[in-house]
Amino acid sequence: MFAPRTTPWPLVALFTAGYLAPYLLPTIVGRLDSGLPLSPTQAGAVGSALLLSSASAGFLLASRVERIGARGLARTGLALALFGYGAAAVTHPVPAVVLGVLVGGFGSGTATAVAATRIAGRPDPHRTTTLGLLCVSALAGAVYLTVPHLGPGHGLPLAAIALTALAVWPATARLPAATPLAGPGRDGNPRLPHRRHGLTLAACMLLWSLAQNSLWGVSGRIGLTQAHLTEATVGAVFAVALGAGLLGVTGAGALGPRLGVALPIGAGTAVIAACIVLSASATDLATFATGEIAWNTLYPIVLSYVIGLAASLDPRGRWAVLVGSASSLGTAAGPLTGSLLSAQAGFPVMGVVLAVGLLALALPMTAVALGRRHGASVETGEGAETVEVMEVVEIPLDTAEATPAAPDRLAPAT
């Protein structure tokens, strides 16, 4: 009787392993730039390739996790992450590093897809997601504080991801082999429901994540070259920002349904746009730290509501994985986009362009949230289902349908 409240630590661990690479993107790109014969734009392209590989795993596996089996698929993903990132960490020829990063990225995406699908079937998905966000934020913060003191080279952050995959491997023994997920709607029509809302949200999240991670992918360079900070100082700012992200995750859980869904998504995106402008224009420690910390505090709050909104579109978790994978595509294009924009126009102009794009995206995302809220009561003829959908939409932080979004770096801080 107490089983539904048991903490699913294997899923939390798998979630952490899958999301760590996007969280460490700034230091990965920065170290590829400084440790290998790559230009900033080329290093950003490698970071984009990593995340694109991760996103492709999500699209490929979104509807196959149940059939293949969570345990075997999770182990495959962790093995790919271990050997891919591990090989990239200890080798120096650029083609070999890129190949290792691609293999590791696919492993990260595989782990994320398994975690997202399994969490969708739990009675307390937001609690599990929150624990995962807390763990990955804490771990990434520790890496940002530690890596600058361990010496130069491109391999340290990649090695950290590989070792995390190795540490998580034993937890997969508690995952099911090929047992279908239990939950409402699992045996119903296999067609994706709410396609218009789902496609709109997926398209918006692709661009939303692209804007966020265009800045995140070059944040390290902004701190080093424009704000004239040391690597240790930039790492400390990122660690504090990730800590602020922990507060954001906790705040999202405490806030719950009090503001509905549309307001946090729309207004939150607008405030994030302002934070991006501030961070991109930073020329000193105070401005840089303020922008990064505020941004990383707000990001997970908005993301939590988007996660709940995506989960409400399909109780089997397919839209959650697909919207998350679309988000990962945007994340993948972020480092290269940020590198190109900053190289052509400078960091401040890049920030303005990204902010304007986010403000435009806030409108259709809010419309989807409003449409799901007002349309939930008439989209099914069974009263019990109607009440359930309304709970998902109204309380995305405590619903049985919420599930994690893709690796957006989950958050600039979270």
Image (cartoon, grey):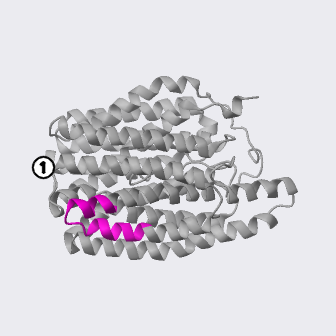
The dominant secondary structure in magenta is helix
Magenta highlight on residue 265: no
Q: Position of residue 112 (x, y in %)?
A: 49, 42
- Quadrant housing the N terminus: top right
Q: Position of residue 209 (x, y in %)?
A: 43, 61
Q: Which residue is mark 1?
A: 37
Magenta highlight on residue 285: yes
Q: Is residue 178 above or below residue 343?
A: above
**Residue at coordinates 70% horizontally, 50% vertically from top-left?**
315
Report whether residue 36 is seen: no
Q: Nearer the viewer, residue 230 or 388?
A: 230
Residue 372 placement, left or right of 19: right
**Residue at coordinates 38% horizontally, 38% vertically from top-left?**
139
- Give the magenta part as a residue range: 272-291
**Residue at coordinates 18% horizontally, 34% vertically from top-left?**
150
> Residue 177 lies in what quarter of the image?
top right
**Residue at coordinates 66% horizontally, 42% vertically from top-left?**
124
Three-letter residue code for mark 1: Pro
| Mark 1, secondary structure of its residue | loop
Q: Nearer the viewer, residue 299 or 114?
A: 299
Determine crowd level at label 1: few under 14, some 14-19, many 20+ residues with C-alpha closer than 10 A: few
The number of numbered discs placed on residues in the rendered structure image is 1
> Farthest residue toward the left?
37
Q: Position of residue 81 (x, y in %)?
A: 38, 35
